[in-house]
């Protein structure tokens, strides 16, 4: 009996006009946007590859004459590769900086990154779209269109009475309806996804590994749960109102509110912009710490009997602090002077003293950077992360927000995913510093002059970045998935209660 | 006909959808007003502070000498924030609000157009603001469809249509009556919400709406009504063609999703994805090439000699490089703007995008406004240079060699006499840019209304 019910539901749904129309529209939108998104990704990947190449060339040609100390202001270029799964959910992948300089003088973060932008920046005013956004809008609408007459329609036609006259439990009927509709709704999702995958595999530049397919699987799972949630919402409305026309109107308003109105309304009502007004306090603290470093260096130089009396040495050792207030970053610049590359014979006796000075100064810079990091980190937290998280939190009151957050987590384009990259750059910085300590580079002559032998930058540790493990993606998506599932179960129970108590 | 209209209105007023619409629109409009009251004074304050800083810079430069004025320029020029920002936010966050002069240039002052990347540091969720464009473009259009999807098919299902037509009423009267009824019953909650919104905004102390702004609001309101008519007509058309109201709603919703929700961004993405772009690197390469070419010709300009001939050569060089640099920057800007404009004009197939462009044009936000601002700045730059040349001619002690300190007037200039930048807007000009799109919107409405009429006349009951 149960199977008969399911079959009836399937046939009922599959043969309708709404089903055909929905599939066609969904396929059109998904295919058109996938083509564009793939092209966009390829463009970004090409940009990334050129950036990596030019940075390598720069390092090999132009920086040949640099001493190690130039790493302070220049840094090692590190580029962030685009995430292929950003085709599904762009998230923050495209928006945030993708080019960062790593040096021992500051801890690299998202907010220190630059953007190598080949695209016309004015294009940002046009709203962008990704696959999850299409699913978010259309799947939910489809689910409601399928659900509004699931129970109310049967009431009106009187077929419900007929079905109930058979010895079937009411729960079974509900469950059969649910299964039947979900199978139907799964079809357009599956077909559009298959088309997408075909398009993805035809692109030569996109290579997806097993983990990526699993991540896509995670996104599909989220889509299913999201779909089911909206179907259940529709069914609940249908069970309560008992009239198809009322159910339809109410469903549409609920859809409009949850998908369209609520996310925009809440972000407009609650201010989630970065709180840049708190920036200046942290800035002054960081500045003070660097000024302390400046004083200590002055002290050291004055105490050194040789360096304090040597004239004309300033070009080698003194520097100026340059700052970037927006990033809370300071660089200790060596004075750019043409005789950096050579050392006059008359200064040769001072070299051991200068080395001694840098043996003191190098680790001190690293230390100072660590101390400023203790201030910068909470500052970034309050300025950027907290408002952002508050906004995200508020968005999660709508299933659409939950779905978006969870798919972002699967794709790795959420804040955590991007942070992974910057954590890798921080580790890279640590590796460089360790290398400096191990090889005693701070105290070497090469630190401040490249006159005897140029720095071989290739011997420095190389940067490598792997996107986070699939397990970590799953762990980040699970809370939202769990919330969506709970909502599903609660709604089903509610529908069951309403349906069981209703008179036919 | 009035009877039909009246009946429709009564029917609608008592319905669930009317109540929900009122609540929804009120909530949206109130949020919009609150946001505007909170943000707008900050915007205006920021603009005034920036302009005052620029003015002070200009005054100090004028007090210094005419050469300083010519060399350093009038300071940064800022775009004036629109008081109608709540009507259309227009992606202002992604548009530059200033034109600058390049830092550290040695010769003449010239205009440069910086890019902004405000969003690069914001790790928060994508924010699309609740402005009138959103409320009317998305929500009101959806509501218009919900009000009309069963206007004809519903009556046919209940059999009341036959009853109505049995009386001696021509069909077009019935159709017009239904159309007017739906229009009135949707206008009531909309007007209510809008009036609350305007009341809140105009009674806020810090915000002052000028007569011109009210005029612009009137035009925006007219466009909003036209846009609503479009969707009412669409609803009637589909409702007349289709037998069952459920099917009618499904068709309407899918049309809405395609044309309103996804068409604008899909088309824009398609257009931007398939147009070649000149990158910033290419632009700076071009600038570098032209710089080096000029430098080869004017290589004597670098001799540190102060005799008349050398000064002339150096002055010529500085003038040349400023002109060339500004022209190149202007070309790059025009290129960027036209590229986006092209993508935007393709999206005009979607009525929602059309509405957005029209709102932006009349609210004075968005890309058109930015273009207007840069044109204003360019006009001002010409005026400013003419002023410098005039003042230079007026100084008998100067050697009249433009572009070098030694050759130009060293006298201070009266700061009052220096022309000031005014970022003006002209409603007539806005109208001209929007005319085509306004006509297109009207055309859509007429076509759909005619379609609804034909469909209803031919319908069998």
Image (cartoon, rainbow, N blue to C red):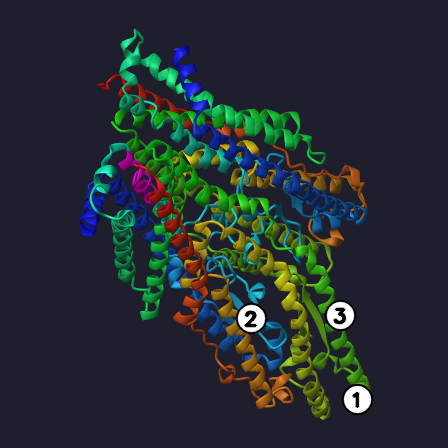
Residue B11 point in image, percent of width and height:
41, 21
Residue B446 vs A161, above or below: the answer is: above
Q: Which residue is mark 1?
A: A304
Which class describes the residues within 10 Å of circle 3: few (<14), some (14-19), or many (20+)?
A: few
Q: Is residue A152 magenta?
A: yes
Mark 2 / mark 1, whichever is N-terminal: 2
Which class describes the residues within 10 Å of circle 2: few (<14), some (14-19), or many (20+)?
A: many
Tag 3 subunit: A
Residue A104 vs A245, above or below: the answer is: below
Asked whether the residues under marks 2 and 1 belong to the same chain, the reply is yes
Residue B196 vs B89, above or below: the answer is: above
Residue B441 — which label?
none
Tag 1 subunit: A
Question: Considering depth in this image, is A215 or B22 the residue closer to the camera?
Answer: B22
For the N terminus of chain B, which image quadrant? top left
SS at badge 3: helix
Which class describes the residues within 10 Å of circle 1: few (<14), some (14-19), or many (20+)?
A: some
SS at badge 1: loop
Q: Is residue B83 magenta?
A: no
Question: Considering depth in this image, is B199 or B299 the residue closer to the camera?
Answer: B199
Q: Is residue A405 left or right of residue A205?
A: right
The region drawn magenta spans A142-155
Q: Residue furthest top?
A: B168
Mark 3 / mark 2, whichever is N-terminal: 2
**Residue B9 visible in image:** yes
Residue A288 — which label?
3
Residue A101 — which label?
2
SS at badge 2: strand
Question: Considering depth in this image, is A504 or A319 the residue closer to the camera?
Answer: A504
């Amino acid at each position: 009996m149960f199977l008969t019910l399911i079959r009836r539901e399937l046939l009922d749904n599959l043969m309708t006009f709404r089903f055909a129309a929905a599939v066609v529209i969904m396929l059109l939108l998904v295919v058109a946007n996938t083509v564009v998104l793939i092209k966009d990704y390829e463009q970004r990947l090409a940009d990334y590859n050129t950036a990596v190449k030019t940075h390598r060339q720069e390092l090999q040609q132009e920086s040949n004459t640099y001493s190690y100390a130039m790493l302070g202001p220049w840094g090692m270029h590190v580029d962030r590769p685009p995430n292929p799964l950003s085709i599904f959910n762009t998230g923050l992948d495209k928006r945030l900086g993708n080019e960062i300089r790593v040096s021992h003088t500051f801890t690299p973060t998202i907010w220190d990154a630059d953007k190598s932008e080949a695209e016309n920046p004015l294009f940002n005013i046009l709203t962008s779209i990704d696959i999850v956004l299409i699913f978010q809008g259309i799947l939910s609408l489809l689910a409601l269109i399928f659900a509004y007459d699931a129970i109310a329609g049967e009431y009106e036609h009187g077929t419900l009475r007929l079905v109930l006259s058979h010895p079937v439990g009411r729960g079974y009927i509900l469950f059969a309806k649910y299964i039947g509709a979900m199978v139907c709704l799964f079809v357009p999702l599956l077909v559009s996804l298959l088309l997408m995958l075909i398009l993805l595999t035809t692109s030569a530049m996109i290579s997806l590994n097993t983990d990526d397919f699993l991540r896509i699987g995670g996104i599909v799972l989220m889509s299913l749960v999201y779909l089911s949630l909206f179907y259940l919402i529709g069914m609940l409305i249908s069970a309560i109102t008992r009239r198809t026309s009322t159910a339809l109107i109410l469903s549409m308003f609920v859809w409009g509110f949850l998908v369209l109105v609520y996310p925009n309304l809440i972000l407009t009502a609650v201010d989630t912009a970065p709180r840049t007004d708190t920036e200046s306090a942290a800035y002054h603290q960081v500045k003070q710490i660097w000024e302390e470093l400046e004083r200590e260096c002055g002290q050291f130089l004055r105490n050194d009997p040789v360096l304090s009396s040597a004239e004309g040495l300033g070009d080698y050792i003194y520097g100026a602090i340059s700052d970037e207030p927006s990033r809370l970053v300071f660089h200790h610049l060596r004075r750019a002077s043409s005789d950096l590359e050579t050392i006059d014979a008359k200064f040769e006796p001072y070299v051991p003293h200068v080395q001694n000075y840098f043996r003191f100064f190098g680790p001190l810079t690293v230390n100072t950077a660590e101390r400023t990091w203790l201030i910068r980190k909470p500052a970034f937290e309050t300025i950027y992360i907290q408002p952002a998280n508050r906004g995200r939190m508020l968005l999660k009151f709508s299933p659409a927000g939950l779905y978006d957050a969870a798919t972002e987590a699967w794709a790795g384009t959420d804040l955590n995913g991007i942070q992974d990259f910057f954590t890798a750059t921080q580790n890279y910085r640590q590796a460089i510093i360790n290398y400096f300590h191990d090889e005693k580079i701070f105290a070497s002559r090469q630190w401040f002059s490249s006159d005897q032998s140029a720095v071989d930058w290739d011997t420095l540790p190389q940067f490598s970045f792997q996107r986070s493990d699939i397990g970590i993606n799953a762990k980040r998506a699970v809370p939202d998935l769990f919330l969506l599932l709970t909502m599903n179960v609660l709604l089903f129970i509610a529908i069951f209660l309403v349906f069981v108590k209703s008179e036919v | 006909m009035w009877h039909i209209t009246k009946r429709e209105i009564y029917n609608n007023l008592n319905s669930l959808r009317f109540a929900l619409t009122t609540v929804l629109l009120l909530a949206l409009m109130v949020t919009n007003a609150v946001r505007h009251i909170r943000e707008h004074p900050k915007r205006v304050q920021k603009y005034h502070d920036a302009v005052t800083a620029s003015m002070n810079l200009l005054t100090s430069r004028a007090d210094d000498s005419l050469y300083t004025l010519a060399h350093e320029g009038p300071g940064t020029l800022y775009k004036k924030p629109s008081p109608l920002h709540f009507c259309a936010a227009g992606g202002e966050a992604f548009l530059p609000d200033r034109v600058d002069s390049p830092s550290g240039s040695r010769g003449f002052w010239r205009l440069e157009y910086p890019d902004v990347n405000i969003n690069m540091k914001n790790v928060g969720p994508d924010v699309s603001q609740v402005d009138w464009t959103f409320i009317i473009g998305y929500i009101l259009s959806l509501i218009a469809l919900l009000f009309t999807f069963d206007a004809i098919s519903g009556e046919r299902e209940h059999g009341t249509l036959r009853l109505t037509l049995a009386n001696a009423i021509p069909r077009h009267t019935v159709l017009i009556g239904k159309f007017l009824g739906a229009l009135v019953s949707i206008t009531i909650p909309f007007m209510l919400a809008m009036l609350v919104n305007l009341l809140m905004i105009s009674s806020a102390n810090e915000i002052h709406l000028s007569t011109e702004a009210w005029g612009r609001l009137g035009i925006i309101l007219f466009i909003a009504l036209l846009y609503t008519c479009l969707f009412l007509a669409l609803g009637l058309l589909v409702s007349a063609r289709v037998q069952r109201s459920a099917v009618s709603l499904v068709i309407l919703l899918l049309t809405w999703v395609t044309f309103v929700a996804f068409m604008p961004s899909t088309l824009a993405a398609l257009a931007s994805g398939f147009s070649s772009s000149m990158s910033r690197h290419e632009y700076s390469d071009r600038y570098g090439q032209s710089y080096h070419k000029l430098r080869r010709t004017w290589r004597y300009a670098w001799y540190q000699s102060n005799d008349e001939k050398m000064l002339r050569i150096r002055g010529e060089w500085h003038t040349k490089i400023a002109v060339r640099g500004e022209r190149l920057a202007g070309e790059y800007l025009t290129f960027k703007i036209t590229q986006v404009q092209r993508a935007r004009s393709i999206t005009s197939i979607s009525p929602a995008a059309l509405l957005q462009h029209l709102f932006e044009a009349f609210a004075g936000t968005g890309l058109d406004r930015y273009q207007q601002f840069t044109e204003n700045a360019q006009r001002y730059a010409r005026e400013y240079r003419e002023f410098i040349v005039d003042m230079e001619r007026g100084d008998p002690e100067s050697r009249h060699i433009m572009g070098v300190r030694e050759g130009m007037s060293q006298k201070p200039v009266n700061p009052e006499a220096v022309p000031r930048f005014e970022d003006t807007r002209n409603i007539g000009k806005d109208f001209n840019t929007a005319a085509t799109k306004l006509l297109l919107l009207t055309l859509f409405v007429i076509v759909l209304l005619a379609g609804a009429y034909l469909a209803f006349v031919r319908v069998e009951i």
